[in-house]
Structures are given as structure tokens and as C-alpha cells.
Image (cartoon, grey):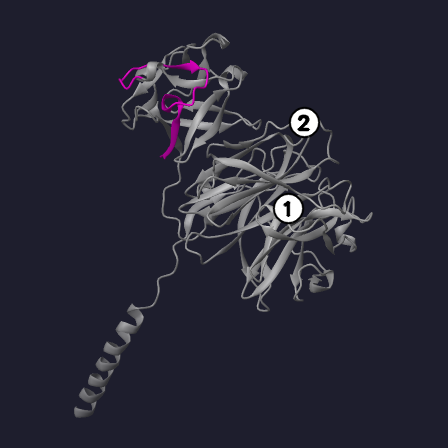
């Protein structure tokens, strides 16, 4: 009996010691909100995605002289988030055919890098790389033009696309896709003195398309993207011609000490991410990287086609998925997942996924409202105290041409410019969808705080609260842009 009590006492003591140990084990990271690919189905090529201060920011190729950005607290929400115009350019030598935008944060500012061409230029020999700078820490801007980034030895005449910024030993390097001395389209690099200036005037070649899998359709190395892990520096890149289903990702690693020397980079001899015919994914490439909100997961964002003949155009959609690391410290991107597959979102997401948006006037603080929730064509659109009603909720649906339609959740009808008139004071009302420019609008970022002007595609005029009234029922009409608070609207997510 004594011996039994003795062992029971010891067991109880051991359990008492173990309980606190178990209790302090860290909880597993919560999975993010479920999402499905694509995360952007309109103009989804060459995606760049950042998670910053509680939101994801996504920007992609436009093929026009406009860059739009989407913002959402969840990855899933990007698929229906408003596309807001954050940059356009009136300078005719550089205001066309914007490709491959990227967003990087240095010294308290965001820098948006992209390639563009002169107005009216045919694709694609006049592409050059440009950079704009944000006024502060808001990734959506507003932005001002800073510089053209090029080199005197790039063929032809400074041609450079797909630029990114590599950081090594506290120094900045611009890495892009170009040609030097008659080379094939290759990866090129130059040092930078700051985020918007290349040091000197010459670039160095660090990777040329020489392996069979880099030359499908045409020999191409483009879309370089740095990836840092455990003190190692990798550079993924896109290989082969984007018109083919064999567009894919390769990988370099910086194994030397000077990023400007080709001998410092070691190329993996096989692709690291490529077509998955069984899943219906073709030509996956031009990627970026981001981390989950809690910092514990690594994610890749990329574009791909859903048919083997998809090519290089707007049929490419933006996709994302988590990746892991091999035992040897190299990234393991896995295989691209099929469209429509529901997956857990990035860990640490806590906000709900928005399903609609309210538009709140900056001057009055009141919401854009369909009067009484009436479903009839011609029902007036006005402002009213925000009350959570579905007649104050809008789906902002991308039309794949830098415009959106504003669909009222309560009625299913769209905001429309009465009679397609161009005069100041023309009423804004709801109407059945006719797919004309009088029903399409550009949301143009105006001021930090998510304030936009709502610009009609047909007339170029903006949604305006009549006479800057603060009263319930004040009419919302179109008017010439005056840059006042009565013409600015805040986009607020809702569910």
C-alpha cells in the first residue's frame, strides 16, 4: 500500500510539472480566410502583391497608360476589390503600354517601377523603365514621377523591362530584362545610388537563355524577382516565350560576393515552377513573393493561362499559393494549383472578406444611396446618413479596361449618367446595365485615406454632391472636377 501511494504521489508531482510546460506551447497559426484562384481575373498579368499595415495591395500589367491597384484585408477579397487608378502619365514619350509594375518601400516612401512606351508606339521595341514615388507611406499614393532607369549599353537604345530592386550588403541594385551587345533577351543588373537613380550608365549580364527549357518559342530570360532566406539570396526569373504554354520559372542563387558578376550567380539546371496540364495551368510565370500577415508563411503570386493557347495577353489571370523550403535551404514552389480550388488563405488574417463597399462623401460623411432602395430604372442616387442598408452598398466590378461599373446590392442596377449628357449638373441615377460608357467609371486615387474621385468614362466628369450640401437627400450629380471635398469619396469595405 505504501509503495502504491508513493508512486501515485510521484505521478501527481510529475503531472503538475508537465501541465505548465504544455500550457506555454505556442498555438498554431490560424489559417487565413478561404480563397480560390484566380485572385484577379481581369488584367491579371505580371502581378506584384504586398502585405502592408493590415491590407494586401495588388498591381498588374495594364497594357494602357494607367496603373490600377487593388486593396483588401484578405487575399480572398482581392478578387472583387475595386481597381483604383493610382498612376497615369500625360507625357507623350512615356504614357503608353504599361507593363510589369512593382512596389518597393524605401526610406519612408513607396516606389512604383514599371515599363512604358511613347504614345501610339507599336509593341514593343520602345519599352523603357520608369519609377514614381509616393508622397508618404500609403501604397496607393498619391505618386509623382521621379526618373527613367536605363543604361547606355542596353539594346536597342536603352530597352529595359520587368525591373525589380535587389538588396545585397545594404546596397541597391536594379535587375531587369534586356540585351547587351546583341545578346538574347537576358537578365541585366546595375548598381543604384538611390531608389530612383542608376549609378553610371552601364548594365552587366548575369543570365542568358542557353538551356533548352529557356528557349521554347524564343530564347528569353525576364521577370527577375529576389527572394531572401536564411542569409541566402535567390533570384527567380521567367524563361521562354510568354506566347507558349512552356513559359516557366527558373532560379539563380548568389553564390559569389559581387552581384554585378555573372560568375557570382549559379543557375539551377532545371525549372522550379512550370505548366501543370493535369490541373489546366499553362505558362505560369512572372511571379512575386509575399509573406503572410503573421510573418510565418511564404507565398508566391504569379500569372498563368487556363488554356495552352492563352498567349501573352489579358487572358492571363493572377494566382497565389503558399510555398515551402527544401532541406537544403532552397525554395520548393510545388506545382501550380487548378483554378477553383479552395485553399486556406495566408495565416494571421483576422478581418472578414469584404463582399461590397460603401462610398462615403468626404465633405458630408454621408453615403452614396439609391433612394428608398427602389428597383425602378431612373431611381435617383443621392446621399444619406450611412445606415448599413443594402441600398448603400455597392459591388465595384472591374470591366477589364481600367473602368468599373457600380452595381447596387439592393437593386442589382448600375450607376448611370442620365441620357449620357455631358453637361455639368446632369443627374446620376440607377439603370439596367446597358454596357455603355455612360455606366462605366474610373476610380482615381485622390488623397491618402482611400479618397477617390468617381470619373465617368463617357463625359470625364465626376460624382459631386450638389452645392456641397450636408443634408440627407442632397442630389448626387456629375460636375467638372474642382478638387474639393464634395467630389471625393472614401471606399469602405463591408460585408
Query: Are discs 1 and 2 less than 8 Å apart at CB?
Result: no
Pick the front one: 319 or 424 = 424
Q: Please provide percent x and percent y for residue 455.
A: 48, 21
Q: Which residues are magenta?
A: 469-495
Q: Please provide percent x and percent y for residue 484.
A: 39, 23
Name the residue located 62 percent from the left edge and 52 percent from the top edge. 192
Q: Please provide percent x and percent y for residue 248.
A: 68, 49
Residue 487 in view in this figure: yes
Residue of label 1:
163
CA distance for labels 1 and 2: 21 Å
In the image, residue 194 above or below residue 366:
below
Residue of label 2:
119
Look at the numbered disc 2 and give the secondary structure of its residue: loop
Question: Does the magenta-highlighted stretch encompass residue 356?
Answer: no
- Residue 406: quarter of image: top left
Pick the front one: 232 or 251 = 232
Question: Does the magenta-highlighted stretch encompass residue 480?
Answer: yes
* In the displayed structure image, the side of residue 207 where residue 100 appears, left or right: left
Amino acid at each position: 500500500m505504501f509503495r502504491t501511494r508513493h508512486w501515485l504521489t510521484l505521478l501527481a508531482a510529475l503531472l503538475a510539472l508537465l501541465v505548465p510546460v504544455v500550457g506555454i506551447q505556442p498555438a498554431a497559426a490560424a489559417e487565413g480566410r478561404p480563397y480560390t484562384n484566380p485572385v484577379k481575373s481581369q488584367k491579371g498579368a505580371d502581378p506584384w502583391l504586398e502585405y502592408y499595415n493590415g491590407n494586401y495591395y495588388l498591381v498588374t500589367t495594364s497594357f494602357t497608360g494607367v496603373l490600377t491597384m487593388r486593396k483588401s484585408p484578405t487575399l480572398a477579397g482581392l478578387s472583387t476589390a475595386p481597381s483604383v487608378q493610382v498612376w497615369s502619365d500625360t507625357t507623350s514619350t512615356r504614357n503608353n503600354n504599361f507593363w510589369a509594375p512593382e512596389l518597393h518601400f524605401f526610406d519612408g516612401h513607396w516606389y512604383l517601377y514599371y515599363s512604358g512606351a511613347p504614345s501610339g508606339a507599336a509593341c514593343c521595341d520602345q519599352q523603357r523603365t520608369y519609377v514614381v514615388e509616393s508622397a508618404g507611406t500609403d501604397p496607393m499614393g498619391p505618386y509623382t514621377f521621379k526618373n527613367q532607369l536605363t543604361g547606355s549599353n542596353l539594346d536597342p537604345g536603352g530597352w529595359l523591362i520587368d525591373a525589380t530592386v535587389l538588396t545585397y550588403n545594404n546596397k541597391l541594385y536594379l535587375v531587369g530584362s534586356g540585351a547587351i551587345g546583341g545578346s538574347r533577351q537576358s537578365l541585366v543588373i546595375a548598381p543604384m545610388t538611390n531608389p530612383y537613380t542608376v549609378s553610371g550608365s552601364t548594365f552587366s549580364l548575369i543570365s542568358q537563355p542557353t538551356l533548352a527549357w529557356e528557349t521554347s518559342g524564343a530564347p528569353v530570360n525576364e521577370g527577375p524577382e529576389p527572394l531572401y532566406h536564411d542569409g541566402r539570396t535567390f533570384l527567380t526569373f521567367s524563361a521562354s516565350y510568354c506566347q507558349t504554354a512552356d513559359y516557366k520559372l527558373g532560379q539563380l542563387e548568389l553564390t559569389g560576393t559581387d552581384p554585378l558578376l555573372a560568375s557570382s550567380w549559379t543557375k539551377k539546371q532545371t525549372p522550379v515552377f512550370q505548366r501543370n496540364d493535369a490541373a489546366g495551368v499553362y505558362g505560369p510565370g512572372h511571379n512575386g513573393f509575399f509573406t503572410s500577415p503573421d510573418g510565418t508563411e511564404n507565398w508566391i503570386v504569379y500569372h498563368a493561362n487556363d488554356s495552352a493557347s492563352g498567349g501573352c495577353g489579358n487572358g492571363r489571370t493572377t494566382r497565389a499559393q503558399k510555398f515551402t523550403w527544401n532541406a537544403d535551404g532552397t525554395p520548393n514552389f510545388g506545382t501550380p494549383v487548378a483554378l477553383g480550388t479552395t485553399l486556406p488563405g495566408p495565416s494571421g488574417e483576422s478581418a472578414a472578406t469584404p463582399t461590397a463597399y460603401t462610398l462615403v462623401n468626404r465633405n458630408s460623411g454621408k453615403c452614396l444611396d439609391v433612394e428608398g432602395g427602389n428597383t425602378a430604372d431612373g431611381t435617383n442616387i443621392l446621399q444619406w446618413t450611412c445606415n448599413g442598408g443594402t441600398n448603400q452598398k455597392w459591388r465595384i466590378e472591374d470591366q477589364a479596361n481600367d473602368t468599373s461599373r457600380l452595381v447596387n446590392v439592393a437593386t442589382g442596377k448600375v450607376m448611370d449618367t442620365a441620357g449620357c449628357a455631358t453637361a455639368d449638373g446632369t443627374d446620376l441615377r440607377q439603370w439596367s446595365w446597358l454596357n455603355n460608357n455612360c455606366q462605366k467609371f474610373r476610380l482615381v486615387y485622390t488623397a491618402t485615406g482611400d479618397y477617390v474621385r468617381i470619373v465617368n468614362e463617357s463625359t470625364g466628369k465626376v460624382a459631386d454632391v450638389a452645392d456641397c450640401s450636408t443634408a440627407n437627400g442632397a442630389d448626387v450629380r456629375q460636375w467638372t472636377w474642382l478638387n474639393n471635398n464634395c467630389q471625393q469619396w472614401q471606399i469602405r469595405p463591408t460585408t
